[in-house]
């Protein structure tokens, strides 16, 4: 093979290996495409080293930089692919997924509606414990100090589904 042929083969195999990493995300192959990409990258770098050690080193460095970037891009896109959605969400339909989102929103809104409500500490809040508000038990976080069991408390805010209380 000619010198220029080794250069073109090396560059082409490295480009193909990066493309195959992205293809692996969309085509379920059990890792065969990824293995093929690894072999193509290895043969590409060897071809570049046979052409010129400087080209081989540059090809190796490019793979070490662009390879993880391509993998990161593929993993970022993967949850939005039909295969990724099926693996992450199971066999949920769009309607079921929307129903789940709606339920999570209503639970979050119900917790936010507790702001200003009063209840009783069921356990010592050091700073985390349990409170009873309107007959329902909730886990809560004391904003200041320790709150003893049996003390009246008031919900001051809800952050990330965490109820924060103070003595009433």
Image (tube, rainbow, N blue to C red):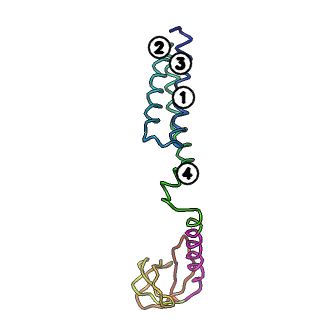
On the image, numbered disc 4 is attached to which residue? Answer: 82
On the image, numbered disc 3 is attached to which residue? Answer: 9
Q: Is residue 103 above or below residue 62?
A: below
Q: Residue at x 49, y 32 (%)?
A: 64
Q: Work out whether mark 4 precedes mark 3 in sequence or the reverse, and give the earlier one.
A: 3
Label ID, residue 16: 1
Q: Quadrant of residue 150?
A: bottom left
Q: 91 and 52: which one is in front?
A: 91
Q: Secondary structure at mark 2?
A: helix
Q: Is residue 26 above or below residue 90?
A: above
Badge 2 vs badge 4, beta-carbon distance below 8 Å:
no
Q: Residues in magenta?
A: 99-117
Q: CA distance from mark 1 to mark 2?
A: 19 Å
Q: Work out whether mark 2 precedes mark 3 in sequence or the reverse, and give the earlier one.
A: 3
Label ID, residue 50: 2
Q: Work out whether mark 1 precedes mark 2 in sequence or the reverse, and give the earlier one.
A: 1
Badge 1 vs badge 2, beta-carbon distance below 8 Å:
no
The residue carrying pointer 4 sits among few (fewer than 14), some (14 to 19) or many (20 or more) residues within 10 Å by Cα, namely few
Q: CA distance from mark 2 to mark 3?
A: 11 Å
Q: Is residue 109 magenta?
A: yes
The mark closer to the camera, 2 or 4, is 4
Q: Secondary structure at mark 1?
A: helix
Position in image of residue 133 (x %, y %): 50, 88
Q: CA distance from mark 1 to mark 4?
A: 24 Å
Q: Quadrant of residue 130?
A: bottom left
């Amino acid at each position: 093979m000619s010198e220029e042929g080794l250069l073109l083969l090396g560059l082409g195999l490295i480009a193909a290996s990066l493309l195959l990493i992205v293809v692996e995300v969309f085509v379920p192959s059990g890792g065969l495409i990824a293995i093929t990409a690894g072999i193509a990258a290895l043969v590409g770098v060897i071809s570049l080293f046979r052409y010129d050690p400087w080209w081989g080193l540059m090809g190796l460095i490019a793979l070490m930089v662009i390879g993880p970037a391509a993998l990161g891009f593929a993993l970022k896109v993967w949850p939005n692919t039909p295969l990724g959605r099926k693996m992450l969400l199971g066999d949920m339909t769009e309607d079921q997924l929307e129903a789940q989102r709606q339920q999570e929103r209503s639970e979050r809104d119900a917790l936010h509606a507790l702001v200003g409500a009063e209840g009783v500490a069921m356990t010592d809040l050091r700073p985390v414990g349990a409170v009873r508000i309107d007959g329902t038990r909730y886990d809560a976080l004391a904003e200041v100090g320790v709150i003893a069991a049996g003390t009246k408390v008031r919900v001051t805010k809800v952050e990330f589904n965490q109820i924060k209380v103070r003595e009433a």
